Amino acid sequence: MSSAALRVLWVRGPGAVLPAVASSSPFGPFELHPSADLDEAAKRLAADRFDAVVIAARTVDARKLLTWPALTQAASEPALLVLTSDEPGAELATLLVRKGAQDVLPLAIDAVDALPRAIRLAIERKSQERLARKAFATDLMTGLPNQGQLIEHMNQLIALREREPAPMALLAVRVEGLGSTETRLGSEAANVLRRKIAVRLRVGVRASDLVASLGTDAFAVLLPRFQDPQDADRVAAKLCSALHPPFTMAGRHVSIAVACGVARYPDDGKDAAGLLRRAVGLAASAPAQGRADGSAADAANDPG
């Protein structure tokens, strides 16, 4: 276990009394930050970071947590535990868990051993959840967002576009040469090549643009905003050109060929899945430009 103190926001609801948890528990150490009510807790959550939030409430008041404006924030990063004055019932306990609470426990819980243990395990479970979400949303080979994360991000942007119309474009980049690189140099070389391609794509766009992985031989670039309708085509041409120079791996040159497809919102579709299908389809039908033989020639000082 880490020796760093775990920061716990300690929230007392109306009529409830928080247990006296020892900050030096074997499951800690804990750094307790008392908060007199939910309003104060909301301000603390907006201004600071906590590993856990523990809310004590009379059971009759616990249902009000379901409509507490800061509930999402309290359950997003910290581990949230709710302590109720008596049994909350299966329905309320289930609703609180669905809203993000790690557990719903009685206020009468043993504060010497059981409560510190529950807080520590809730923090560990929350940490594992974050790791799982990150792994699910990331292509582990390149570190880029994967297709699911791309779709989610696009859906959020499209929801905003319904209120504030603005052009948006999705580029699909199809790569030829990864298979032959794997055949000639091995699977790890092909993985390194994918990572190098990802780096060139990220370098070639703005910080506000999103580069994502679409599988072993395709990438996507989301352009959330641009001025000129031709900007998307210019970015696509720029990225394809950036991928044409050979890549250097272990002192060898490896070349690829690329094809791009561009789908524009709202002209080519008004939903994320439709725009992705359009862009990928155009990239699949477009002729790939460059060399895709995956050949490995001796390299000089190419940093690619």
Image: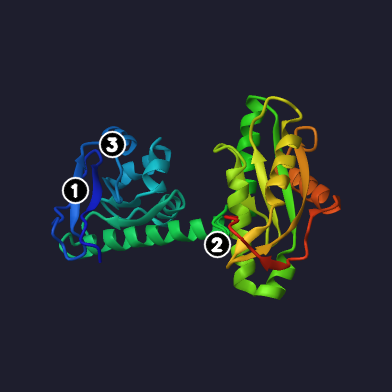
Which of the labelled discs sits on residue 140, or is there none? 2
- 260 left or right of 100? right
Q: Does residue 68 sit above or below 261 in this rendering? A: above
The residue lying toward the viewer, choosing from 14 and 228, is 228
**Quadrant assignment for the N terminus:** bottom left
Q: CA distance from mark 2 to mark 1?
A: 36 Å
Q: Position of residue 100 (x, y in %)?
A: 42, 51
* Marks 2 and 1, the one that precedes in the sequence: 1
Name the residue beneath numbered marker 1.
Answer: 32
Q: Nearer the viewer, mark 2 or mark 1?
A: 2
Residue 221 location, quadrant = top right
Name the residue beneath numbered marker 3.
Answer: 44
Q: Position of residue 198 (x, y in %)?
A: 61, 53
Q: Does residue 154 sit above or below 110 in this rendering? A: above
Q: Label 2 sits on what residue type?
A: Leu
Give the secondary structure at mark 2: loop
Residue 116 location, quadrant = bottom left
Q: CA distance from mark 3 to mark 2?
A: 35 Å
Is residue 18 visible to the viewer in this orientation of the structure? no
* Marks 3 and 2, the one that precedes in the sequence: 3
Q: Nearer the viewer, mark 3 or mark 2?
A: 2
Q: Residues within 10 Å of mark 3 (few under 14, many from 20)?
A: some
